[in-house]
Amino acid sequence: MFFLKMLSKLPLSVLYCLADFLAFIAFNVIKYRRSVVFDNLSKAFPAKQKAELNKIAKKFYMHLADWLIETLKASNLSETQLKRRVHFEHTELIREYLDQDKSVIVLTAHQFNWEWVLLSGCLAFEAPIDAIYMPVSNKRVESFLLSIRSRFGGSPIPKDEALSILVKRIKKKRIIAMVADQRPPQHATDKYWSHFLQQETAFYLGPETLPKFIKLPVFFMRTHKTGRGRYTVSIEKIAEPPYDYLKKEIMPLYIEKLEELLEKHPDNWLWTHKRWKYTRGAYE
């Protein structure tokens, strides 16, 4: 970790040169999860030709490398630097609730760079952000990520502890953030099935049940990479109480928004994970 901390002190201009090298090595030399990436892309976009999929994949590896060094740099980026690099649109939609001392839930996805969006969101709204996350097995990496995510008021919450912690905190206004496009493990019982990017896809049901349990409005947050190290984050309200507890209202809207986003910017999503590892039959 000492080496990573020293590396993070380098200017972004130098780190982006490193990112260029890492992207080239990952795509052309070690071919890091390249078969997974192409398998995912070909299934998600069957109408696209091989040359176009290859172009998307190369851009993806560049974004992935940028995400890596930007996450590393996030450990010592200043407030001023973050505010200059990440711009939020339509913040008044969320401020309307925060100004009334009410909490909100924000659903986002594995778009680059979600780490910077979390940090800059704390600054943009001047409210604590409870980011629900999946812990990683490597304790050193876990500790390093938590130290980054907790800067500027972030308060990461492990997924399995989210409900009990949020019930205790809910009386104080806050933003609850969920990266809602993760794949549930095979044994999970809280799954929501949807036709997503040409596949029958399992999602966690939490983004549907949590807002209804604690009676909070839900917003969709989309990130657009406007340049290297430059992002615009747009906010849209997709649901609010009163809810119909007998009907799935939130997840269909979230999935629709996410699919629209990926159709428009297919290179800006985490294609290295095995999103369709299990079929519906294997789950059930």
Image (cartoon, helix red, strand yellow):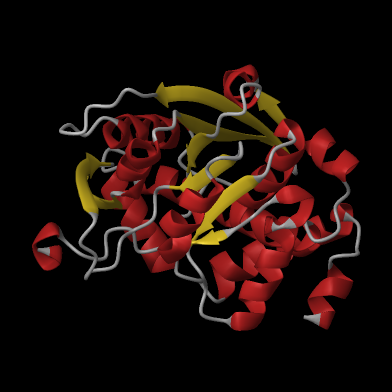
Residue 92 position, x and y percent, is 64, 18
Q: Is residue 142 left or right of residue 191?
A: right
Residue in view at x 45 percent, y 41 percent: 266
Give the vertical position of 271 relative to 244 (above or below): below
Across and down, in percent, residue 252 comes to: 27, 33
Q: Residue at x 68, y 51 (%)?
A: 154
Location of residue 139 with respect to 216 vertically, above or below: below
Give percent across and percent down for residue 136: 52, 73
Q: Quadrant of residue 90?
A: top right
Residue sitting nearer the eye, 124 or 203: 124
Position of 19 with respect to 78 (left or right) is left
Q: In the picture, which quadrant includes the C terminus?
A: bottom left
Q: Position of residue 177 (x, y in %)?
A: 53, 44
Left or right position of 48 against 17: left
- Figure quadrant of the N terminus: bottom right
Number of numbered discs present?
A: 0
Q: Is residue 272 visible?
A: no
Q: Quadrant of residue 150?
A: bottom right
Residue in the picture at 83% in, 81% down: 2
Residue sitting at x 48%, y 47%: 178
The residue closer to the viewer here, 90 or 42, is 90
Q: Quadrant of residue 174?
A: top right
Judge whether residue 160 can be spotted in this image. yes
Of the pair 235 and 150, the residue shown nearer to us = 150
Q: Is residue 117 left or right of residue 257?
A: right
